[in-house]
Image (cartoon, rainbow, N blue to C red):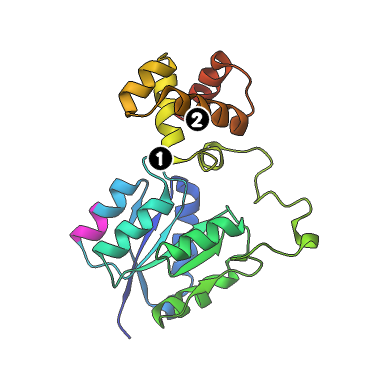
């Protein structure tokens, strides 16, 4: 049986060390840890410079949204098995990850008992989805009290509320630019900027520009 070379990408060192220990307790899987990554940049450096079979990756990376990393990896390394390993369990994340080219989605909220099956399924070309996860809205009885494992929204979840254009507008608002200046920068109308500004405030739950800028800076959105 050939050795399977695995990369684990996560900013939490305790988690990557934990997964490494679990892997080492399963010699029958014949897995070698090819490297640990803490950012999207690390991921590409590792995969480009050595042979890698599987990558376990978190969505919330410090330098890039993991959902956008997946299609880049899939295009550049078509044979690489990509498995999201995250505590974000909302069906929208699962669905988008798989649509973007992921081969599996492993919930950090589940036990490690699924790990062996996950690896085997990936190597056999099967799609792995942790128990309890969905790619469509789950039944209402399962949604009550379910906030994807996070009682307080973090930066990653907040960023998902905004479109790419809204992120651009927010960045310029944070530079104290007015609607006319933003319109000139983005080659859109003043009215369109105004609509984006209102939508951003509504989505982030703030009522004026001062609080909007403070919120964006506090949550490192810009």
Who's the residue at 43% across and 53% down the image? 67
- Residue 118 in the image: state x and y as whole percent: 50, 73
Magenta stretch: residue 47 in it? yes
- Residue 2 in the image: state x and y as whole percent: 30, 82
> Residue 104 or 203: which is nearer the viewer?
203
> Residue 169 or 2: which is nearer the viewer?
169
Residue that mark 2 sits on: 196
Residue that mark 1 sits on: 62
Query: How many neighbours does mark 2 have within 10 angstroms: few (below 14), some (14-19), or many (20 or more)?
Result: many
Location of residue 70 (image quadrant)? bottom left
- Residue 53 in the image: state x and y as whole percent: 31, 71
Who's the residue at 50% across and 30% down the image? 196
In the image, residue 62 sits, relative to residue 192, either above or below, namely below
Q: Look at the magenta stretch and give its main secondary structure.
A: helix
Span highlighted in magenta in the image? 45-49
Q: Where's the N terminus, which quadrant? A: bottom left
**Element on which disc 2 rests:** helix
């Amino acid at each position: 049986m050939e050795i399977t070379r695995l990369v684990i990408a996560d900013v939490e060192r305790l988690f990557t060390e934990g997964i490494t220990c679990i892997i080492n307790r399963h010699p029958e899987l014949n897995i070698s840890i090819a490297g640990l990554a803490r950012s999207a940049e690390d991921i590409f450096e590792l995969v480009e410079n050595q042979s890698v079979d599987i990558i376990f990756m978190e969505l919330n990376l410090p330098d890039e949204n993991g959902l956008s990393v997946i299609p880049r990896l899939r295009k550049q390394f078509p044979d690489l098995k990509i498995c999201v390993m995250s505590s974000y369990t909302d069906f929208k994340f699962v669905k988008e990850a798989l649509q973007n080219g992921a081969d599996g989605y492993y919930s950090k909220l589940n036990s490690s008992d699924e790990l062996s099956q996950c690896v085997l399924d990936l190597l056999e070309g099967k799609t792995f989805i942790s128990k309890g996860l969905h790619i469509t809205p789950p039944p209402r009885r399962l949604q009550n009290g379910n906030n994807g494992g996070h009682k307080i929204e973090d930066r990653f979840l907040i960023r998902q509320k905004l479109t790419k254009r809204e992120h651009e507008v927010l960045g310029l608002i944070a530079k104290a630019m007015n609607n006319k200046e933003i319109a000139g920068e983005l080659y859109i109308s003043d009215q369109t900027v105004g609509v984006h500004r209102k939508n951003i405030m509504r989505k982030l739950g703030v009522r004026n520009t001062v609080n909007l800028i403070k919120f964006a800076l506090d949550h490192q959105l810009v």
